[in-house]
Image (cartoon, rainbow, N blue to C red):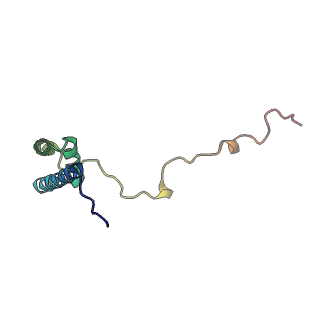
Amino acid sequence: MYMPKTATSSEKKMSEEDLEMDVDIEFLLATFSDLSYESISDVYLANNGDLDATIEMLTQLEIFSNEAEEYLPDTLDIGDVPETIEPSTSSAPKQTNASTSTSSRTPNAPSS
């Protein structure tokens, strides 16, 4: 007769921790909707699953990000840049093969 496997206390603890992590990350995703799942989970794991520390860190990152935007220019002034460059109009010098530019004579061959 097959007996179903009962979960050990360590398996139950892992399952509870996984569930808690999933709930915490879902909460963080709703709170910080402009951040990706990967970013939020990385910060959460870096804080060893401490929800309060993760919220504090993400809040500081949001504040820093908003302050940095104040100093960004409205446009990038890089001058006039052609949209495409035709390969035949390239101004790069063509490389020559060194063996074709030297004399066809062998350097130490006797002259006749």
Location of residue 47 in the rendering, given as x and y in whole percent from the top left corner: 18, 41
Viewer-closest of 95 and 21:
21
Which residue is most to the top?
A: 108
Q: How many marks?
A: 0
**Residue at 36%, 55% in the rendered image:** 82
**Residue at 69%, 45% in the rendered image:** 100
The quadrant of the picture occupied by the N terminus is bottom left
Residue 75 seen anywhere in this rendered image of the structure: no
Location of residue 97 in the rendering, given as x and y in whole percent from the top left corner: 64, 45
Viewer-closest of 31 and 24:
24
The quadrant of the picture occupied by the C terminus is top right
Residue 19 seen anywhere in this rendered image of the structure: yes
Location of residue 9 in the rendering, given as x and y in whole percent from the top left corner: 21, 50
Q: Is residue 107 left or right of residue 68?
A: right
Quadrant housing residue 36: bottom left
Location of residue 15 in the rendering, given as x and y in whole percent from the top left corner: 21, 54
Q: Is residue 78 left or right of residue 49?
A: right
Which residue is most to the bottom?
A: 1
Quadrant housing residue 54: top left
Which residue is most to the right?
A: 112
Q: Is residue 92 left or right of residue 70?
A: right
